[in-house]
Amino acid sequence: MDLIDVDIPVCWDTPPPEILRTIEIAERLHGQMKSDEDQKRIPLLVNSNYYIAYHALKHVRDAGLGSGLGSGRGGDLSFCEWGSGLGVVTCIASQLGYQASGIEIEPSLCRFARTLANEANVTAKFIQSSYRELPERCDEETLHQPYPIGPRTSDVVYAYPWPAEEAYILTLFARSPASKSLLVTYHGGTILRVRERVLQ
């Protein structure tokens, strides 16, 4: 399987107020978290550029991209963030109309993301798990979970991989049963890539 890049127009327009409010809430909560001694053990938490992520996900939605075998209904696209961290991008996806979920191994970050979703009045699901630990079989607990921790595929997968992790992300994405899903990856600064599969 090969991946090809999908052109995403550059846009620097200010996001709408509800998106800005979610980012502002996240920044306030993050400031509180950093002052908490228990949170200082979380290593090297680096955030995506939320403004770039917003415009990319909005373009995917508006252009009708990524409408493959995901679970979206009524025109809605499903979204899953692998390594959702503070949960901001997942919340933004939900605000854009995606059926959004995030997978995060760190319990305190999952709690943060759920608090953010609650305060921003956003419907987003955060699963405390690792996207690297694939289940050996599908059971009642994993039946409705997003890939890779369950069988439910997503129309759009988002990740901010460390450089050494990117090859694994690509391999994991290639194994997804959804043939037309999009992989959106942030690479720091203003670099964001949207890729789709080319089936051989």
Image (tube, rainbow, N blue to C red):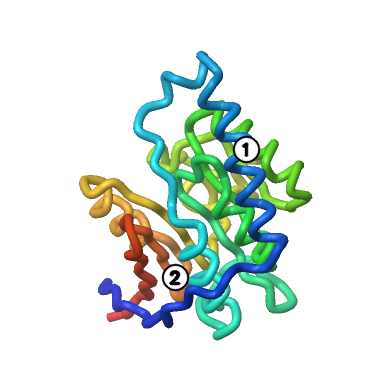
Residue at the spot of label 2: 182
Left or right for 168, reference 156: left
Badge 1 local density, few (<14 within 10 Å), some, or many (20+)?
few
What amino acid is found at the position of numbered circle 1 in the picture?
Arg
Q: Is residue 161 above or below residue 73?
A: above
Badge 2 local density, few (<14 within 10 Å), some, or many (20+)?
many
- 101 or 132, which is in the foreground? 101
Residue at the spot of label 1: 28
Task: Kindly state the secondary structure of the residue where label 1 is placed.
Answer: helix
Q: Is residue 62 above or below residue 71?
A: below
Residue 50's mark?
none
**Quarter of the image that includes the C terminus:** bottom left
Q: Specify the quadrant of the image occupied by residue 89.
A: bottom right
Residue located at (75% from left, 42% from top): 118
Q: Is residue 117 above or below residue 9?
A: above
Q: Specify the quadrant of the image occupied by residue 19.
A: bottom right
Residue located at (54% from left, 61% from top): 153
Find the residue positioned furthest to the bottom: 63
Q: Is residue 159 above or below residue 10?
A: above
| Closer mark to the observer between disc 1 and disc 2 | 1
Residue located at (63% from left, 53% from top): 91
Residue located at (32% from left, 80% from top): 198
Left or right for 28, reference 85: right
Q: Specify the quadrant of the image occupied by residue 42.
A: top left
Horizontal and vertical percent position of residue 58: 57, 74
